[in-house]
Image (cartoon, coloured by chain):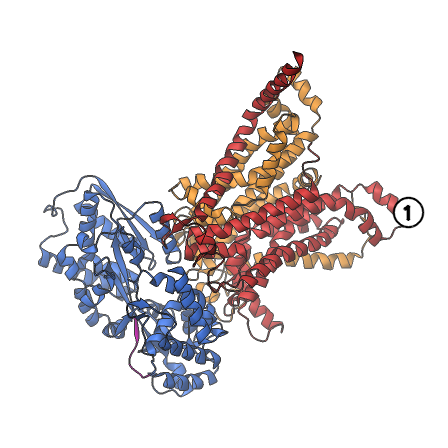
Chain colours: A blue, B red, C orange
Amino acid sequence: MLAKLTKVTAIAAASMFVLTACTGTPSGTSSAPTGGQLPATTIKILAPNYGDTSKADWEKIIAEFNKKQPNVKVELQMEAWETFTDKVKARIQANDLPDILNDNAFASEATTGLLYPITEVMSDSTVKSIEPSLLKNGVGPDGTQWAAPDIASARMMTINTDIMSKAGVTAAPKTWAEMEAACAKIVATKVSCYGMPLGKEEAQVESSLWLWGAGGDWVKDGQLVANQPAAVEGFTEIKKLIDAKATQPDPGASNRQAVADAFNQGKVAMYVTHSGLMATTRKDFPKIKYTLSQIPSKDGSPVAFGVTDFILAFNNKDANRKEATKQFLDLFYSDAMYEGWYKGTGLLPVTTSMINAAKSTDADNKDFYDSLSYVKFNPVSDPKWDALKNALQGTAGTIQKDSPENVLKAVQEQLDAAS
Amino acid sequence: MSLPVAPGRARSRRRKEALAALPWLAPTLLLIAGVVIYPAYLMFWTAFQKYNSYGILQGPAGWSNFFGKGGAFTFPTVPWTSVWTNTVIWVVVVVIMTLALSLLLAQFLSKDFPGRKALRLLVLLPWACSVVLTTTVFRYGLQGDVGIFNRFLVDTGILNVPYGFTKDPTAAFWVAVFVAIYVSLPFTTYTILAGLQSVPNDILEAAHVDGANAVQRYWQVVFPMLRPAIAAATLINIINVFNSLPILTILNDNGGYHTGHTTTTLIFQFKAQLGPGVASALSIANFLFCLVVVAFYFWIVKPTKEVQ
Amino acid sequence: MATKGGVFRKPNPWTTAIVAVIVAVFFSFPYVVMVISSLKTRAEITQQPPDYLPTSPQWVNYLDVWGYQAVDPGQALLSSIVVALGATLLVLLVATPASYYVARYRFPGRMAFLLLVLITQMLQPTVLAIGLYVEFVQWKGYLVWLALILINAAFNLSFAVWIMQSFFASVPKEIDEAAMLDGLGRLQTMFKVSLPLVWPGIVTAIIFVFVNTWNEYAAAFVLRNDKLQTLPVAIPSFLGQYVKEWHFMFATAVVAMIPVIILFSMIEKRLIGGLTAGAVK
């Protein structure tokens, strides 16, 4: 803990220097900020809790921002992820639009014309500081950059090496066939092989992994399609694992945290994880030895799941708020501020400079950074994705008792009816 | 001359009386108008409006929220047979079981024995602790992995391996039935206890002298006198149980349109996934059901008779 | 009274004792589990399979829970108390004059009024939740408390009017008339003369409104706000997608249980009296 703290402080100090050197705008009060001081106004931020420090991390940036813009009041509202979408909906319905929203989707807001293109509220240099392959994820179907990623996360397979060697599995499985063979051996040691969260929180992630593993994609000819051959193939493989009792009990109603808990207790040999969950394992369950690996696919080509969350800016038709938003976001993405913020999320950074810095210093997450080169994303920019996501979350779990064809037919029907 | 005047006078007298009552009743009327009737109107209105997935109003929808492509009653994959059966089972089984157990319990608690007061207080616990808190204990206890009740069931040999009660929609539904009975017992028991107290002792003694045995005395003397208590408790239970949302949602770990829904939980599922319009459409069905219950109640109990 | 042996013969004391123990266990086991679980560490509560008892009771959970970030138990407790007290008070203020007047006077529209009250008794916030949501979604900040107070008061009003009017009706009219001859106004008569006589009815009404509001979930759920949410809505948020803080949740639950248990044990006796004269009559 102390070591980590020292490291953070050291990096923060170093990047403070970098910031001062590069942009020439020290964070002190000596030089007036660009555009001078704004008149009294309020900007509102709505953001989810990534971890215990999320609120404090935002407040740190707000305090820094207020040093430059003392007249701008920043209202911060933090919400738990579980109810976050409801909250966003409620704010929109109440016409209480946050100037800055940190969310995992942007398609619905973009199609209703409520947003500024994010490039209008970020200076060019800030936009350019974001890793292009990640930035792309915030482009809507109309080609407009509606959102900017603010954190990234990659998901890979983690495997308990003790269980692996006890079961006599020598290498992390890369293909489905290897995985089935490994699972047969692991299940024989009375431990669940694969933690599969197909419940209402994570089914949209888990389903995609197996679809991609079969070489498919949700988007076909510009349309979201659930009931397609690759999906059937993926779900057939899911069902194979469930029927072979290779998964934990009740995969159809499990979420990722439950699976992670089981992994930390040594009850599950492998599951698809992210850097935040592995940080908990290292810290609270040091006895668990693990290795990270690509997610198995049919032919062995590597699969990893990428997620970016986004910053969205709502159009409140107020020039001062817009300018304040812009200055806030420029500050937010500055290395000095962004570094502490992204570390508080336990996830991966999106700015090129931070990714490069982290690659060399953050050995624990090296595999995750490497996987960023082949991660695939769910089609979050498609306005119909919400309908597909809802359908998967509610229905994918029924694969436990139903055939892949029936499950995907039901998902497709819901997708068609809801969009 | 006098004939046409009399009704007019009567009318103005009646108006005066009604006006005199108004200040006393106005706050009640206002509250009911503002927070019961107006939202009911809003709900009907909402049912005929189209909303996008973020709940933003898109314009009139006609009947599409009811029977359209993504309408409440026509949305694909909703297992309606389960939903209707569950709703009926939920209300009927919970209300009847609660009543049966409460009759026994009240009979027992009306006896004189040491520690009766303490026991009566214990029986109040599920009523005093919020339904959500009680339900959450069951949710925790019945988890397949960390649940203490599961451990107990395995230790006592009732189960071979822990069972994820909350993971299977049907099992979760039946657990919810149990919990709903559990939390309804205190109120019902107390209402019947109150009823038992109003059974005069001399009637019982008279029955005793007549040579009636205990069972006969119960069914022929006590039970009929409990009727008002039973009617009141049953009515309140029907309404409470039918409208109960948290027990079913907290105990069920499944998402989507599973086989553990009642119409009430389905409304909230629709609200989250299809927006307020579709949810309102189904709410109206529930609302009409409540009105049917009211009508039945008036027909059977005739509650306005006694205040006439 | 059924106390002297009741309808049945005097039972075997052993049978009574055994039944009493079964009843006691049946009605307390979830709450015993709640207390025990609130004293476990996070590791103990997520242990698979679980142990029945914590190795050493973690009383510190009861301190730590107040600093827990994802849910604010203090705020939830405060919200629940404010809303429950507010609704109870409002109901008393509104229902007392109405029930008094209805019980004392015959006037045109009286039947219609009672019918309206009865019909609203059949409705609950759940069935109108979407409408309430549309009505109150704009109410932000502390107005959420006011909205919830109004909602809970409105939906519990009918029960209070109904039960209190039957109590007022049981007070002989002559008492009131004597008071009014002494020069008291109607309102004064109600407050000074009738009200003290119908105290059991009021207690019953208070309990009902308070407990129903304390438990109300649907309206509190659709109107919830990150800062102001009542306990029933806040409690499940301890079990998020990313965290499962069962021990903190149960610690909050135990704290929340205490005031209501105290309230109930204070009025247990009156409760039966109130129900006897009111709902059951």
Is the C terminus of chain C in the top left, top right, bottom left or bottom right quadrant? top right
Where A308 falls versus C5 (above or below)? below
Q: Which residue matches tag 1?
A: B210
Chain letter of the residue beneath label 1 in the structure image: B
- Element under label 1? loop
* Residue B98 left/right relative to C240: right
Q: Quadrant of residue A166?
A: bottom left
Residue B57 image position (x, y, % from top left): 36, 48
Residue B95 seen in the figure: yes
- Residue C7 drawn in magenta: no
Q: What amino acid does circle 1 point to?
A: Asp
Residue in view at x 68 percent, y 33 percent: B307
Q: Magenta stretch mostly in which secondary structure?
A: loop
Residue C59 image position (x, y, % from top left): 48, 56
Question: Crowdedness of circle 1 by 10 Å Cα count: few (<14), some, many (20+)?
Answer: few
Magenta-drawn segment? A299-305
Q: Of residues C144 and C38, which is closer to you in this image?
A: C144
